[in-house]
Image: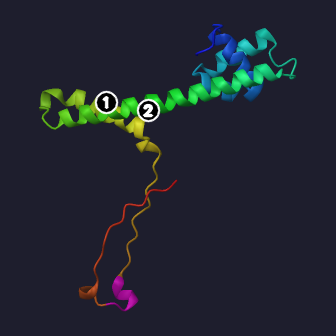
């Protein structure tokens, strides 16, 4: 954080809890939800919901910084994965574990597991009254979301 006053991570989480709630604060801060919940209970953070404007501005600044950090981290990891994947072209079977790690990193960074693919649809074209010799099929890669 670029402010002149250093702020502890716990204080940042407290501000996030007050502004966004425990679940979102846990996601934004990277702290486990149970830890955030216990901190909230012990500190009685939600007893007073009135938040001074300065605190709201600080929370917004922290949220923006966390979002920027996520984007920059994803970009750096994507660049690194690309370089390592290029090197993987020359890898031998002995290096297959390392190649697998690169592939897993790329899958996480690019969110490949979240992409939904449409199921293939088979149509008997004879039922449609079409001559199979006149049919030209192309495959389209459609990404949803």
Q: Please give left or right for residue 10 compared with residue 142 in the image.
A: right
User: In the depicted view, which residue is nearer to us: 107 or 54?
Assistant: 54
In space, the residues marked 2 and 1 are separated at their CA atoms by: 10 Å
Magenta-colored span: 125-130
Residue 76 included in the magenta stretch of the image: no
The residue at 63%/7% (across/down) is 6
Q: Please give left or right for residue 122 compared with residue 33 in the image.
A: left
Which of the two discs, 2 and 1, labels the residue nearer the N terminus?
2
Q: Position of residue 10 (x, y in %)?
A: 66, 11
The residue at 57%/26% (across/down) is 66
The quarter of the rendered structure image containing the N terminus is top right
User: What residue is pinned by disc 2?
Assistant: 74
Q: Position of residue 41 (x, y in %)?
A: 78, 14
The residue at 35%/36% (across/down) is 106
The residue at 46%/53% (across/down) is 116
**Label 1 neighbourhood size at 10 Å, few (<14), some (14-19), many (20+)?**
some
Q: Position of residue 93 (x, y in %)?
A: 13, 32
Asked whether the beta carbons under mark 2 and mark 1 sit within 8 Å of each other, the answer is no
Q: Name the element at disc 2.
A: helix
Q: Is residue 27 something that shows in the picture? A: no
Q: Is residue 38 something that shows in the picture? A: yes
Indicate whether 12 appears above or below 108: above
């Amino acid at each position: 954080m670029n402010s002149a006053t250093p702020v502890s991570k716990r204080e940042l989480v407290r501000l996030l809890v007050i502004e966004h709630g425990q679940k979102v604060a846990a996601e934004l801060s990277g702290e486990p939800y149970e830890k955030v919940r216990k901190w909230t209970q012990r500190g009685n953070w939600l007893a007073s919901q009135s938040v001074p404007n300065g605190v709201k501005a600080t929370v917004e600044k922290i949220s923006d910084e966390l979002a920027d950090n996520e984007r920059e981290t994803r970009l750096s990891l994507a660049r690194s994965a690309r370089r390592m994947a290029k090197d993987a072209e020359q890898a031998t079977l002995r290096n297959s574990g390392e190649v697998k790690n690169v592939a897993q990193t790329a899958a996480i960074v690019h969110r490949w597991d979240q992409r939904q693919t449409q199921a293939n649809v088979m149509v008997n074209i004879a039922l449609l009254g079409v001559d199979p010799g006149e049919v030209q099929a192309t495959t389209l890669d459609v990404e949803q979301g």
